[in-house]
Amino acid sequence: MLKVENLDVYYSKVKVLNNICINISDREIVTIIGANGAGKTTLLRTLSGLLHPQRGKITYLDYDISKDKPEIIAQKGISHIPQGRQIFGPLKVVDNLILGAYLRFKNGTSKGEIEKEK
């Protein structure tokens, strides 16, 4: 479903991700764990199109999204919901998640699906 091959990502001239490979199957749950500064956020920003790799390939549902813009990646179904200071503070957690899934709701997903997953 999601495949990351030989991913290198830089901030300016500093290499943050080096040769990352991940293969995630449909309905598989994967966690990314590491110390501060290990590259977790950089990986998520790259998967959602906020950053682009200098080397490597990201494939989602057999489509290369490595160079796609965030809005194209979101339309395909990948959402990035940040934590902490980047969320809408006055909203409940579930409301922030609903905002992250806006396109799914627009295309027919019901709020009942969120309730079902709780």
Image (cartoon, rainbow, N blue to C red):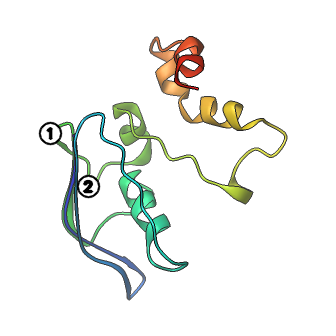
| Quadrant location of the N terminus in the rendered image | top left
Q: What residue is rendered at 42% in x and 61% in y?
A: 32
Q: How far apart are the two marked residues, 1 and 2, measured between alpha carbons? A: 12 Å
Q: What residue is rendered at 34% in x and 33% in y?
A: 76
Q: What residue is rendered at 44% in x and 73% in y?
A: 39
| Of labels 1 and 2, the one closer to you | 1
Q: Are marks 1 and 2 in contact (CB under 8 Å)?
A: no
Specify the farthest residue to the right: 90
Query: Relative to 21, does residue 78 appear above or below in the rendering?
Result: above
Snapshot quadrant of residue 61: top left
Q: What residue is rendered at 69% in x and 55% in y?
A: 86
Q: Is residue 14 left or right of residue 109?
A: left
Snapshot quadrant of residue 16: bottom left
Callout 2 secondary element: loop
Residue 91: image x %, image y %? 79, 36
The amino acid type, in three-letter code, at marker 1 is Asp
Dot 2 alpha-carbon crowd within 10 angstroms: few under 14, some 14 to 19, many 20 or more: many
The amino acid type, in three-letter code, at marker 2 is Ser
Query: Relative to 108, does residue 88 appear above or below in the rendering?
Result: below
Dot 1 alpha-carbon crowd within 10 angstroms: few under 14, some 14 to 19, many 20 or more: few
Callout 1 secondary element: loop
- The dot on residue 66 is 2
Query: Relative to 66, does residue 75 appear above or below in the rendering?
Result: above
Q: To which residue does mark 1 refer?
A: 62
Residue 75: image x %, image y %? 39, 32
Q: Is residue 65 left or right of residue 85?
A: left
Residue 74: image x %, image y %? 42, 37
